[in-house]
Amino acid sequence: MKKFSFSIPVIAGALLATTFSCEKKNVEFRDMRPVTEVNMSTYDFIRNANKGGLYDTLIYLLDKTGLADKLKSGKLTFFVPQDFSIQAAMYDLNFTREKRGELGNWTVDSVRLGIWDTLLSRYMLEGNYTLDTLRYADGMNLTTPYGYEMNGKAIITTASGIEGGGSSVIQYSDKNNSRIMKNWVLATTESANLKTTTGIAHMLEAKHIFGFSSFTPMAYPPVRRPYFEQPLGLPGHIEIGYYDRGGLGLAYQDNDVAQRGTSPFRKDEGVDLDNCSEGLYNTGHTNINEWVKFTVKINYTGSYRIACMVASPNDHGRLRIELDDVNISGSIVVPKTGGYQTWRTVEVPNVQLVEGEYTLRHFLETGGYNAGRFAFLPNDRVPYNIQPHSIPGEIFATEFDYGRSNESYFDSDAGNKANGKAEHRVFEGPDCEKVNEATGTYAISHGVKGEWLTYSVDVKQTGDYKIVFRTSGTGTAGKLHMEMDGVNITGNVNVVATGAYATYKDLEGPVVHLTAGRHILKYVNDNAGFNVYKFKFIAQ
């Protein structure tokens, strides 16, 4: 195992004074009035200040990640960590590896490049921030280039037993996504306010550990766990970007060190995520034997079809889906679609699944194509929430039963084409549109005469119920009706104009008599020109 020396190196302030002054003093860099300047970029200054190997590893990582270019040309404030802090972080990481029964022999090259990029970026701020700009009681919240929030605060140190009798320094804190200061992790500058041609450099003390408290958990996560901390529920669709947390070899396998995709999402990891034209994300720059894992919970035992979105200018792609390391899909052929953002859905028709919690793996048998979201949809009629909707109560129109087209629903065109298509009922035909009055809810839109949807319902008690429809539309010709077990229970209901498709209002329907027990409720569009959001059954 490589041994790290932890003798304190020559302090940065003294080094700066040696480099740019005849006197070896640190004072002029502790509380400078006016700002000391050098006629070179921040990057070149660090290289010139690298006496005795103080910044060897830092310079190597700046070059490797490409962040050196930002320090050469941008306008950045850089809180400069010493090599000692990087070595201390690597020591902690290898200590953790040994405690888990692994070899404690990792070097900086063993850590994913995306980790270095992410954590080094936490030391960088766009713009110039000096001691004067940070003289606030609680400091100033600062945003890094990747949108991560830090805090900077100018403080006066204690000297010769006199509180506030020392020089000014900056306390630079990682807020750990918390408003509570006791959860923050801080670093203190050893020298501050050096003005370069490309920004401001503040030199951090050697005792700071690189990455604050984040380095080891990010570089060597302890366990694989669901992205949202809870398993993804099936039936339903899976966004490929929501693969499990855990890192390389545990939650995913990618042949490139860095994330080369177009999306900033999960940029510190190696999966090459693109912003997808038909969804949130897709994997790009794909290579043979790359994979991502998901923790899933199957809520219904039965027959499913697997639907996968793919895009490719080539015709040699293949992928498979595994459940607890068992190939359940066979080898799925990826067809030539016309481009990397020209999407097509491929299906595996009959896969038997059993209720329970599993590890699901989306495995690329070859590369050269983009892979997007995928879904597990029951072939049988299954209530949207597994259990039937209760009456009395309200039913959201887009929560129609799972099942096959022409059995559980009928839509005149194949695709979900409304603005909610990337989020809700993704692989099914009915058109789902976002409803502004309640976040995360949808209405059935783009209606065509003759389209219909069905819902498994449980009428709790025999009796009379008033139906209230919540609809929107600009015309006055809209009509609908409801059936129960194939019997028209409402007659034709005229849909009243609301002034706009985004404006929903209650439309009172008839009072109907229902019998207790489980039934199939059917909504039928008798004439187009409106959206339907939900149905409410009120006991009379």
Image (tube, grey):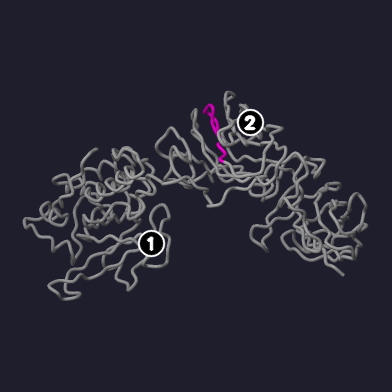
Q: In the image, residue 116 lies at what x, y percent?
A: 34, 45
- Asked if the magenta segment contains residue 398, the reply would be no
Task: Write the start and end of the magenta stretch as one range.
Answer: 359-370
Q: Which residue is mark 1?
A: 175
- In-image side of 323 versus 84 (left or right): right
- Residue at (13, 52) in percent of width and height: 10
Closer-to-camera residue (23/162): 162
78 relative position to 27: left or right? right
- Whichever of callouts 1 and 2 sits on the residue coming sooner in the sequence is 1
Residue type at mark 1? Lys
Q: Between tags 1 and 2, which lies in front?
A: 2
Q: Which residue is mark 2?
A: 329
Please tell me which residue is depicted at 49% across the width and 29% down the height of the picture: 289
Which residue occupies 82% across, 40% down?
406
Q: Quadrant of the N terminus?
A: top left
Q: Who is closer to the viewer here, 279 or 111?
A: 111
Q: How far is mark 1 from mark 2, CA to CA?
A: 44 Å
User: In the image, residue 451 lies at what x, y percent?
Assistant: 83, 47
Mark 2: amino acid: Ser
**Residue 366 within the segment the image draws in magenta:** yes
Neighbour class for label 2 at 10 Å: few (<14), some, many (≥20)? some
Pointer 1: residues within 10 angstroms few (<14), some, or many (20+)? Answer: many
